[in-house]
Amino acid sequence: QFQKPEDAIKYRQSVFTVMANSFGKIGAVVKGEATYNKDEVAKNAAVVAMMSTLPWQAFGPGTEGGKAQALVWSDNAKFKAASEKMQLAVVDLNKAAQSGDLESIKKAFGAAGATCKGCHDDFKKK
Ligand code: ASC
């Protein structure tokens, strides 16, 4: 799928960039910095949920580098578990966003953000 490790690194970083952009737009609403628009939040949450499935294929053997810690490969089971936790959390966020209940969105957003941070703490270089 990727010719060079750099291609895999660029791919996964691009996915995370798009994900963070949409997640950040929801964050602005959750923090009260932007007005709540149901369709906007629903669209961004759907983007986050869809994008969350993509980066993992670009962490294969021999693709060490970027901001990924060596632990991604040396304890891949733990990394996979953390990635699955995040994917479940953003599915919840997407459900809340499609329902249009801002209080549920706030709760699900906080839980999803914690899974982003949890994985960064262990697997991402500062
Ligand atoms: C974001 C973003 C992350 C998470 C994380 C949550 O908006 O880009 O990586 O939220 O900061 O703690």
Image (tube, helix red, strand yellow):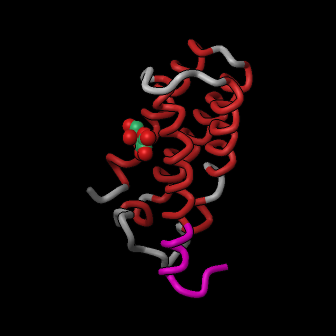
The quarter of the picture where the C terminus appears is bottom left
Q: Quadrant of residue 85?
A: top right
Ligand 1: image quarter: top left
Dominant secondary-structure state across the stretch colored magenta: helix
Where's residue 31, x and y in %?
Answer: 42, 23
Residue 102 is one of the magenta-drawn residues? no
Residue 2 magenta-highlighted = yes
Q: Which residue is rendered at x = 49% and y = 47% of the image?
A: 20
Residue 117 showing in the rendered view: no
Q: Report the residue that reaches farthest toward the front.
A: 35
Which one is in front, 14 or 38?
A: 38
Q: Is residue 96 above or below residue 57?
A: above
Residue 32: give x, y in percent of width and height.
Answer: 44, 20
Query: Which quadrant of the structure image shows residue 92?
Result: top right
Q: Viewed as shown, does residue 118 lie left or right of 24?
A: left
x and y percentages locating residue 38 in the rendered image: 68, 24
Magenta highlight range: 1-11
Kindly identify the residue that appears in the image at 66 percent across and 45 percent down. 47
Q: Residue 56 appears at what percent x and percent y?
A: 58, 60
Residue at 48% across / 39% down in the picture?
Answer: 24
Residue 35, quarter of picture: top right
* Image position of 81 (left or right of 94): left
